[in-house]
Image (cartoon, rainbow, N blue to C red):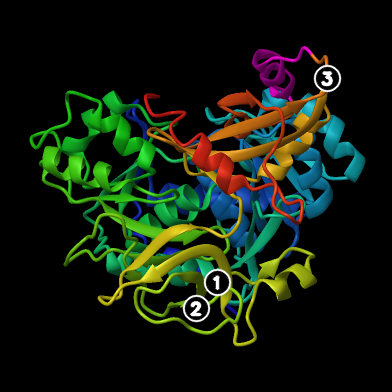
Amino acid sequence: MSNHLFDAIRASAKSGDATFIETVDGQRWTYGDVLRLSGQIASAIDVLGVRPGDRVAVQVDKSPLALMLYLACVRCGAVYLPLNTAYTLAELDYFIDDAEPRLVVVSSKARAAVETVVNRYGALVETLDADGAGSLMALARDEPADFIDAARAPDDLAAILYTSGTTGRSKGAMLTHDNLLSNAMALRDCWHVTTTDRLIHALPIFHTHGLFVATNVTLIAGASMFLLPKFEPDEILSLMPRATLMMGVPTFYVRLLQHEGLNRNAVANMRLFISGSAPLLAETHVAFEQRTGHAILERYGMTETNMNTSNPYNGERKPGTVGIPLPGVAVRVTDPVTGETLGPDETGMIEMKGPNVFKGYWRMPEKTAAEFTKDGYFISGDLGKIDTAGYVHIVGRGKDLVISGGYNIYPKEVESEIDQLDGVVESAVIGVAHPDFGEGVTAIVVLKSGATLDEKAVLAALRNRLARYKQPKRVIFAEELPRNTMGKVQKNLLRDQYSGLYLHAS
């Protein structure tokens, strides 16, 4: 049996001396390096006792070697579990407890603190730093590069990505080898990505967008990339004369539009700009095209499904839409109550089915069953419609998920932390339209009589309890929260009330 995903990557790779990654300081990793380093790291993981199906949790800074670690896990049959570098120890404790990884890889500076959590669960801890230091690479350098890849079938797990929902804690979405491979191949073909393309990669690699879309598509196409630690407009613009592609979240394009250096000359060599992970405002789409002559290609995906739809490469890229279903992916809109499939331009629940859709939630069979229809469609929780031309429009979310800067934030998790503070009666966390982040995390807090808690104190209390992107941008105090006759907090009314809160934010 072959290794379903890595066999395809190996087959698509350009010659060994062709560039896969270049960093801003001029360092270069070839496709030959991909095979050699991923093989050595896979050998090291094997020596550590990681076997096919074991989970490997990774919380490290973005670097070429971090991508080699991901590929090593694919090769040795481990289930890759990327974790946001902003997660606190309290958050990390949940993921380690739930996923039960055999190995946890962190930065050298974080090792001592992380071991206080991990040791309770019996996992091994190794380190990997962006500069190549750390115990994992020290072990890998003495290991052979000609690793024999573990046999992995299309339906075998390749990764678990934790995602937020509407109830409970984060859920682990189980993604198979074919979920990842089929989606990468579909996107490569739809976006016409070839060996001549060079991608500007400024996305995080603990997220579907940066890890599976940007990286896997590049690999499957045999293309190359500029791997940047983070988004910096000056740096992005300086690379455009040598690049052909950019993938980003709406925030990237908003900030580029604020830069005086963005013009048609700056993007003359660029072939395609792609946006996702959060809604792209139609005005951003229009403004970018006016400045550059490029219509941003917006697509739609989820942690559980990878990418579902895309605006066309050739054809109209409609502002405010996420395009048409990818080849092999079926998308429909149904009545949320009856489940009946709706007609064109009728708003309802978006559901999808295809080889991109995940296997289910880790160790949550009942939750998995509840999220799929009897005929196998995944219920996205997003409300939308399909117009007469077949374009999908996202009009809102049936769930209370907040998407800020491309990251999913589960309000209940933030509310639980706020509600524990002395002087707090209750809280409601909502997403409010933000010109830079898409949505700003906003907390509405009701205090006990006589409590003196203020906004600064609430934010300070949350600083070490929640990842930075989950922390509210504003805390607003109210006498009470609006409720319906059933006692449910009406967050829609709060969103309406504070809709202009960030109107002049930047």
Residue beneath the point at 58% across and 71% down: 379
Secondary structure found at label 3: loop
Residue carrying label 2: 354
Q: Number of numbered discs present?
A: 3
Whole-number angstrom distance, CA of label 1 to CA of label 3: 49 Å
Q: Residue at x 28, y 63 (%)?
A: 311
- Residue 65's spot in the image, x, y percent? 52, 40
Q: For the residues carrying marks 3 and 2, which lies nearer the camera in this image?
A: 3
Residue at the disc numbered 3: 449
Disc 3, disc 2: CB below 8 Å? no
Residue carrying label 1: 357
Residue sticking out furthest to the front: 485
Image height check: is 372 above or below 113?
Answer: below
Q: Which residues are magenta?
A: 452-464
Q: Amino acid at mark 3?
A: Ser
Front-lying residue, 4 or 300: 300
Q: CA distance from mark 3 to mark 2?
A: 54 Å
Prevalent SS, magenta region: helix
Residue at (78, 37) in percent of width and height: 416
Is residue 319 found inside the magenta-colored segment of the image? no
- Taking the image as shown, residue 140 lies to the left or right of residue 11, namely right
Q: Is residue 457 magenta?
A: yes
* Nearest to the observer: residue 182 or residue 458: 458
**Residue 380 image point, x, y percent:** 55, 66
Residue 8 visible to an observer of this rendering: no
Q: Are marks 1 and 2 in contact (CB under 8 Å)?
A: yes
Residue 430, horizontal then vertical, whole percent: 59, 40
